[in-house]
């Protein structure tokens, strides 16, 4: 049976395990971290960093803040990543009521902080930047000026663990950072709630086709990582659709995902948190994981990934020289591997974007250049067991 028919049999409008950052997807709220954000804003901590490994739900947490504005915040402006200064200015200005802008002189990037401070008055505005580790330093420098000149503007930067180093290395931001929060791992109960809410969201009934034990085994397989829960859930559902199976118990989940063995830790997990997480997870068969997504890449993209797998980081110039390719074409492919080409990501849903991450600048081949490396998730998927 194809997936469409399988979904209809279950009365699903679509798969509950779809990976999307749409604001309408139900979420499990992070109460502890949300309370920390409210406390920070109440204490006038105006720049807060929120970090977590890949797949822990940083974008979902941003959506939580958008859906339920923290206490005291009147305006909230979310940014998904990669916006240049002018676009950020336009989005912020669009949140200010029309009546407050009557007779206002148009501001530029150098006067925007004063303009915003005047228009907000006593109202507080929260700017939330997702995937902040990939923003250019130019934006951070501009935001520092806004922070200095607009007293009621608060900023939250969400990103990978390296974001802390990036912010600290930017001297104009170093002393302005007020607080750092690390998203904790989800527990089994929270992962269970994610699945239940999503099945209800797509029109399903209860937890069907999962049994209680089947759902429990699926949650254990995710090892506290929400994104892995969605990956494993979709994999199980697709296999059951092909086999016309409408009861998914623990044995079936285990048979599809692999055998239960001791721990596969998520990337960047602090040692202090290791004892707090269950030590069971699912080890996936090598043949279904190793190079699984490589077949969906173009030949040159695959060559780039293989080169980055063998080294810690490389610049576009270095990659172009090794591949014998023009740096413009290599740069374009790097952009696609980072997930910045929306059409590309939609055409190739099986690729775990971002495959490649940008890690600031370094001196390469005699000059300062941006350097790139494989994401921890891609490296894990490409590593032999």
Image (cartoon, helix red, strand yellow):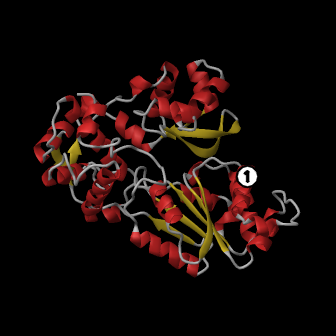
Where residue 165 sits: x, y (%)? 57, 58
351 or 347, which is in the foreground? Answer: 347
Task: Determine the residue positioned at 11% across, 43% down.
Answer: 251
Residue 77 vs 231, above or below: the answer is: below
Q: Quadrant of residue 326?
A: top right
Query: Is residue 149 something that shows in the picture?
Result: no
Task: Determine the residue positioned at 60% across, 26% down.
Answer: 330
Task: Determine the residue positioned at 14% across, 50% down.
Answer: 211
Left or right for 384, reference 346: left
Left or right for 4, reference 259: right
Left or right for 298, reference 107: left
Query: Is residue 140 something that shows in the picture?
Result: yes
The mark total stands at 1
Q: Identify the image quadrant of the N terminus.
A: top left
Residue holding disc 1: 85
Where residue 53 sits: x, y (%)? 42, 53
354 or 191, which is in the foreground? Answer: 191
164 or 249, which is in the foreground? Answer: 249
Residue 298 vs 211, above or below: the answer is: above
> Around disc 1, counting alpha carbons within 10 Å, would you say few (fewer than 14), some (14 to 19), or many (20 or more)?
some
Residue most extreme to the left: 251
Residue 7 vs 30, above or below: the answer is: above
Residue most extreme to the bottom: 43
Where residue 369 sits: x, y (%)? 67, 39
Where residue 260 sits: x, y (%)? 15, 46
Q: Identify the image quadrant of the C terminus.
A: top left
Task: Determine the residue positioned at 22% across, 52% down.
Answer: 207
* Dot 1: element: helix
Q: Quadrant of residue 196?
A: bottom left
């Amino acid at each position: 049976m194809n997936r469409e028919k399988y979904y209809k049999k279950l009365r699903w409008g679509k798969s509950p395990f779809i990976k999307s950052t749409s604001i309408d997807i139900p979420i499990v709220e992070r109460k502890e971290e949300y309370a920390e954000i409210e406390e920070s804003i109440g204490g006038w901590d105006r720049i807060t960093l929120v970090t977590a490994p890949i797949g822990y739900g940083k974008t979902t947490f941003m959506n939580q803040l958008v859906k339920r504005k923290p206490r005291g915040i009147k305006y909230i402006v979310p940014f998904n990543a990669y916006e240049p200064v002018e676009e950020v200015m336009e989005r912020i200005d669009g949140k200010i009521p029309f009546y407050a802008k009557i007779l206002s002189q148009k501001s530029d990037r150098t006067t925007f902080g004063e303009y915003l401070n005047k228009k907000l008055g006593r109202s507080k505005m929260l700017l939330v930047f997702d995937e902040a580790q990939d923003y250019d330093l130019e934006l951070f420098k501009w935001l520092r000026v806004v922070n200095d000149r607009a007293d009621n503007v608060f900023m939250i930067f969400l990103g990978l663990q390296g974001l802390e180093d990036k912010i600290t290395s930017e001297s104009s931001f170093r002393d302005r950072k007020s607080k750092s929060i690390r998203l904790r791992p989800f527990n089994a109960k929270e992962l269970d709630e994610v699945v239940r809410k999503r099945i209800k969201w797509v029109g399903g009934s209860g937890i069907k086709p999962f049994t209680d034990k089947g759902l429990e085994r699926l949650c254990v397989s995710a090892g506290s990582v929400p994104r892995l829960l969605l990956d494993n859930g979709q994999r199980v559902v697709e296999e059951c659709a092909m086999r016309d199976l409408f009861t998914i118990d623990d044995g079936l989940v285990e048979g599809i995902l692999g055998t239960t063995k001791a721990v596969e830790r998520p990337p960047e997990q602090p040692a202090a948190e290791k004892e707090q997480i269950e030590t069971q997870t699912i080890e996936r068969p090598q043949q279904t994981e190793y190079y699984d997504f490589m077949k969906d890449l173009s030949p040159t993209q695959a060559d780039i990934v293989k080169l980055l797998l063998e080294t810690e980081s490389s610049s576009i110039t270095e990659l172009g020289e090794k591949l014998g390719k023009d740096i413009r074409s290599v740069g374009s492919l790097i952009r696609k591997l980072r997930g910045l080409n929306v059409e590309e990501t939609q055409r190739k849903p099986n690729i775990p974007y971002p495959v490649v991450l940008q890690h600031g600048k370094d001196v390469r081949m005699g000059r300062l250049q941006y350097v790139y490396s494989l994401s921890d998730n891609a490296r894990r998927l490409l590593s032999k067991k």
